[in-house]
Amino acid sequence: YCHSGAGEPFVPFDVLVNQRRNEARRSLLVEVAGLPSSTDLHQVCSQYGAVRKMFHYTTRHSNVNKEMILVEFDEAESLEKALQATRSPPTERIIPVHSPFVWLSASRTASSNRKKTNISSTTDIIQETVPSNEELQLQLSQSRDLSEQIQKSYECQKLTELGSRLRFFTCRQVEVALSGLFPQACVLPFGSSVNSFGRINCDLDMILELFDVTNQDTTQRLVFQAKKSRSAANPRITMQRHMEVISDILDNFVPGCSQVRKILAARVPIIKYRQDLTDMECDLSMANRSGFYMSEMLYLYGSMDKRVRPLVFAIRKWAKDRHVTSPYAGRWVTNFSLTLLVLFYLMRTSPPVIPPLQMLIKLAGDDDVRTAESINCTFLRDLKILTASDNKQSLEDLLRGFYEFYDKFDFKERGLSVVRGDDFVKPEHNALYIQNPLERELNVSRNVTLEELERLRSEITHARYRLEEDTEHIEEQQGQQPWGLLSLWGASHKPQAHRGLN
Amino acid sequence: YCHSGAGEPFVPFDVLVNQRRNEARRSLLVEVAGLPSSTDLHQVCSQYGAVRKMFHYTTRHSNVNKEMILVEFDEAESLEKALQATRSPPTERIIPVHSPFVWLSASRTASSNRKKTNISSTTDIIQETVPSNEELQLQLSQSRDLSEQIQKSYECQKLTELGSRLRFFTCRQVEVALSGLFPQACVLPFGSSVNSFGRINCDLDMILELFDVTNQDTTQRLVFQAKKSRSAANPRITMQRHMEVISDILDNFVPGCSQVRKILAARVPIIKYRQDLTDMECDLSMANRSGFYMSEMLYLYGSMDKRVRPLVFAIRKWAKDRHVTSPYAGRWVTNFSLTLLVLFYLMRTSPPVIPPLQMLIKLAGDDDVRTAESINCTFLRDLKILTASDNKQSLEDLLRGFYEFYDKFDFKERGLSVVRGDDFVKPEHNALYIQNPLERELNVSRNVTLEELERLRSEITHARYRLEEDTEHIEEQQGQQPWGLLSLWGASHKPQAHRGLN
Ligand SMILES: Nc1nc2c(ncn2[C@@H]2O[C@H](COP(=O)(O)OP(=O)(O)OP(=O)(O)O)[C@@H](O)[C@H]2O)c(=O)[nH]1
Ligand SMILES: Nc1nc2c(ncn2[C@@H]2O[C@H](COP(=O)(O)OP(=O)(O)OP(=O)(O)O)[C@@H](O)[C@H]2O)c(=O)[nH]1
Ligand SMILES: [Mg+2]
Ligand SMILES: [Mg+2]
């Protein structure tokens, strides 16, 4: 196994997260009248310090397009200066909250500014182009083979640079909103936003930690006064009360937050909202650092071999199009469970593409020790010491292999463990048993009903035969009928079934 | 009229308020094990910068005494450093909020620190001594005359230096709590906490302004994104929603805030709470800057002549003891109305002790222009240009004069105006009509019923005759029976009637 297997140099998760958080601390999101304002904006921002990068995007909300520019300054101090100079909107009917979400008002001396346009900015504005569904289908239909399709599909649909920045920036807004009460408040993305399996428009899962438990110097004599929680005996109730207040803050004060809902009775209580200005669905939870480490684990598996991410993408997309998964929680398989299925399969190829988690645990050093919510989350974090896999299968072979593997798998009797990389006799009678890699006595697919498992299995069988048919008739089909991923997805068959979600 | 009439050099209200706010920004409130810890605390604090002053006091709450020390640093930066080094309490069951309310934990190296005690602090700890009710009564009974009683009573009961600091500090805590969302948030005390008529334990009235409307540079191109209020058409409903969230923040997170109640249907919606650590009852309102200017006006009248404050105190205390006023809002006269009655009377003595408000309005300069909530609050702020009153009456004469004046006043037909310093035909049929000095079409005593007015009048008559009896039998009484203020207050007659409030 080798880190370089992913094609790019390996960046440890912590390094990546810190870099993104730092970018977010230096960034300002500005609504502008249109792209031509970017020169103007660059000029305005440069008053406060050097501008490093500018990204443009458009959001569409209630039939109104908003032109947005994410500005990254060189220095966090420049952002502070800019925000200090930022004024409140003129009308009294709105709530002028301090946040790095701003708006560029029209210049009063528009004509004189126009002239300066030639002096021009040295920062080019970055505009990411994401192929439309049609473009993607065209590209896939013109691919050489299924492996190329899988690779292209991944590259077109993976989270972009801007997408990733906006996610950390959306987290930052919540931190800033709470900073008066909790200056150490830390909001971190987890789930598909950072586990490297996230699609362009995936939702944003966040954990909020009000203070930094790890960084407490107990020799300090001064200690903050604190409120005794009214339900001190039940930390969960305390957390729910906090989340209620935080959700009201988001709902009433924080710009762009809409459709704020509290789902506090869930196993992991969450606040759901839409951030209209960065255009994403957000799930905010607390006391869920183990979820963050779970995402780190998935990120590590994605980094271990360059075939992992494209393969997971292809399978997640297939499952979505075939309604095996759904954006709504329910009786069906989640993307998380599905990802574990793919990882488990990749541990069982011969030779294996990736090692079982217990190997990463065995290799963990002192720096890798982590505990969260009393769950041991210790495993190797720096993949440089791993060697590359001996498995040389193509993406196509692996995809076919996946469907074959699970077509034959004895879900009825056997459970799967990515910890051991092995299956075992199910300890319970749930339809599907996938061991939680961190809380090993739990089944992450406990929610799946027998009916839904049967649907999954029949879709797997169906996919397996589709791909076999493909091979048999490859000459006839190419250029005429959808083949490969396109035939699997069924996208061209029933586009109306697309829910355009997740 | 002359500013120096108040005995002390005149400090403009704005200067006073800014000085107090700056002190609060440099102050830290520390709960300690006992007074001996103060040396220890001084040492701990001095790590972060020079300590200017330290005040000690004791609060008693649910049968537990807390020893508190208010530390004032020389520099605001020192406070910031101290708070940065402050740690969260160890248990997970409480909510560690960043605020300048802290606690000094026991030293781990207590013995070694003890030795250093001799090196000792250079800052003496200030302990204010406030005479008990019994001590005050003794002092008053031994006074030379009624004027001395009135003066002494004022000096013993007026708000102390520490009391005033703790009020601004309590305001500061709310500012800090909201600073993440509203870095410009400004919480100002008003009412008896700053109008110079406040007793030691008076409640704390506060106004909260979320952002600084006066300080908006409209040439700035960057404008904060803001939420459209859901009830944009009704600013009052918007304010009520904000107050709900703020009250939940206080209730759930802010140390020392207890018994948080929302009274949002009132004319001026308020959040009521107790700050246990500074030991005061708090009323927080929004959009009420005119209340602040009203307090400034009262402060100015208190500063104009040194007899005003002692006289107002004596009459407020009499009214409280005779149950003419009450700590609860209701059908009776408020301290505010009563104060206006005193001021009105002082405008009607001959020669007048204080000028009518219209004179202050006429003398106002450009710097004095203020508008709040569309109410014109412009009047002279710097009293230096006023000359002293020609009235030379003693406090005793003025007190007697007050009761005589209102014993004869035709409340039935006439209303009072401190603006014109004159009475006029009542425009409405309220029992008592005292024109609101800023909103002139309003009656500040509209709440008073005929029954309560009659009670006030009979208490006035009663007081008048008490004082006349006093004069007739002065020799027999002195040293034996309560006389002067003591006979007026009736404190010794029915101590059980004291409600120990307000
Ligand atoms: N322990 C545990 N963690 C879960 C479970 N489901 C989800 N998670 C964690 O929560 C994260 C976010 O959950 P989701 O938003 O449902 O999944 P996702 O990986 O972000 O994928 P999307 O469907 O693209 O959002 C996952 O990445 C897991 O780390 C579960 O059943 N058990
Ligand atoms: N316009 C108006 N303002 C009022 C009225 N009552 C009180 N205020 C203002 O609100 C301030 C605070 O009110 P209170 O707390 O009731 O009175 P106070 O002067 O602080 O006296 P205490 O009884 O010691 O609290 C007053 O000083 C006035 O400025 C009223 O009826 N009308
Ligand atoms: Mg997710
Ligand atoms: Mg008051």
Image (cartoon, coloured by chain):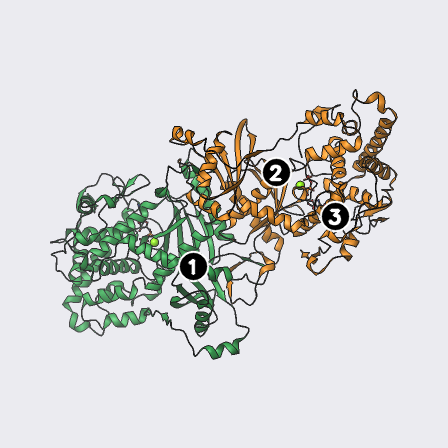
Chain colours: A green, B orange
Q: Amino acid at mark 3?
A: His
Q: Which mark is residue B3?
A: 3
The reply to whether discs 3 and 2 touch (Cβ–Cβ < 8 Å) is no
**Residue furthest out toward the front:** B119
- Identity, as a three-letter code, of the amino acid under mark 2: Gly
- For the question of whether residue A162 can be seen, the reply is yes
Q: Position of residue A273 (x, y in %)?
A: 44, 54
- Circles 1 and 3, Cβ within 8 Å, touching? The answer is no
Label 2: chain letter: B
Mark 3 to mark 2 CA distance (whole Å): 24 Å
Of the two numbered discs 3 and 2 in the rendering, the one whose residue sits closer to the viewer: 3
Residue A23 pos. (x, y %): 36, 59
Give amino acid for label 1. Glu
Horizontal side of residue A286 vs B439, given as left or right:
left
Residue at image location 22% in from the left, 74% down from the top: A479
Q: Name the element at disc 3.
A: helix
Which residue position holds label 2?
B163
In screen coordinates, is B467 left or right of A1?
A: right
Disc 3: host chain:
B
Horizontally, residue A116 falls left or right of residue B471, namely left
State the CA–CA distance, disc 1 to disc 3: 47 Å
Q: Are marks 1 and 3 on the same chain?
A: no
Rate crowding at label 3 as few (under 14), some (14 to 19) or many (20 or more) other CA atoms within 10 Å.
many
Label 1 sits on residue: A77
User: Are the numbered discs 2 and 1 placed on the same chain, yes or no?
Assistant: no
Please rate how many residues cluster around mark 1, counting C-alpha atoms within 10 Å: few if below 14, some from 14 to 19, many from 20: some
Asked where in the image residue A403 lies, by quadrant, the reply is bottom left
Task: Say which element carries label 1.
Answer: helix
